[in-house]
Structure formats: structure tokens, C-alpha cells
């Protein structure tokens, strides 16, 4: 989860990390929010929580 409006850490850093992890064989789910800056939105927090809950069930 990364905001495309983040002026502290560009979202391209997350894209780059995702690409490198995938190249190393790691499953990656990357999500980007167009209007979110260097914070997490309520929607982003809910998506992250759902992902973590799913991982814990697997």
C-alpha cells in the first residue's frame, strides 16, 4: 500500500521493491492510492488488515 501523492518516499520505490521481490520468487500484492500522501487512508488500512488476516489463516 503506497500513496502516489507521497512526497517523502516516492511510490516508485514500492514499485521497484515489488519488482525485485517478484524476480526473487516472492509473491507480491502491491496497491497504490492516487490521492494518498505519506500516510495511510482508512481504505488502505482496511485492505492491509484484510491481507494480514488472510495470511494468518493460510
Image (cartoon, rainbow, N blue to C red):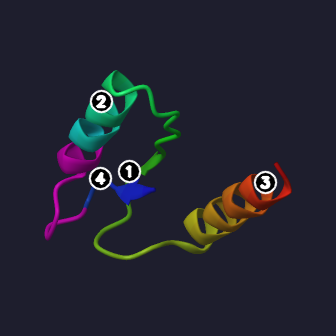
Give the spatial CA distance, label 3 vs label 4: 25 Å
Q: Residues within 10 Å of mark 4 (few under 14, many from 20)?
A: some
From mark 2 to mark 4, how far is it between C-alphas? 17 Å
Q: Dot 3 lies on which element?
A: helix
Q: Which mark is residue 52?
A: none
Sequence-wise, which precedes: disc 1 or disc 4?
4
First reached walking from the N terminus: tag 2 or tag 1: 2
Residue plotted at (17% across, 55% down): 10
Magenta stretch: includes residue 12: yes
Residue at 82 percent of width and 48 percent of height: 58
Foreground: disc 2 or disc 1: 2
Magenta span includes 8? yes
**Mark 4 lies on residue:** 4
**Residue receiving disc 1:** 34
Q: Which residue is mark 2?
A: 19
Q: Which residues are magenta?
A: 6-14
Q: CA distance from mark 2 to mark 3?
A: 22 Å
> Is disc 1 placed on a helix, strand or loop?
loop
Q: In x, y percent, where is residue 12?
A: 19, 43
Amino acid at each position: 500500500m503506497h500513496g502516489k501523492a507521497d512526497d517523502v518516499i516516492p511510490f516508485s520505490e514500492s514499485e521497484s521493491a515489488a519488482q525485485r521481490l517478484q524476480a526473487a520468487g516472492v509473491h507480491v500484492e502491491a496497491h497504490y492510492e492516487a490521492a494518498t500522501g505519506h500516510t495511510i487512508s482508512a481504505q488502505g488500512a482496511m485492505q492491509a488488515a484484510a491481507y494480514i488476516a488472510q495470511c494468518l489463516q493460510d
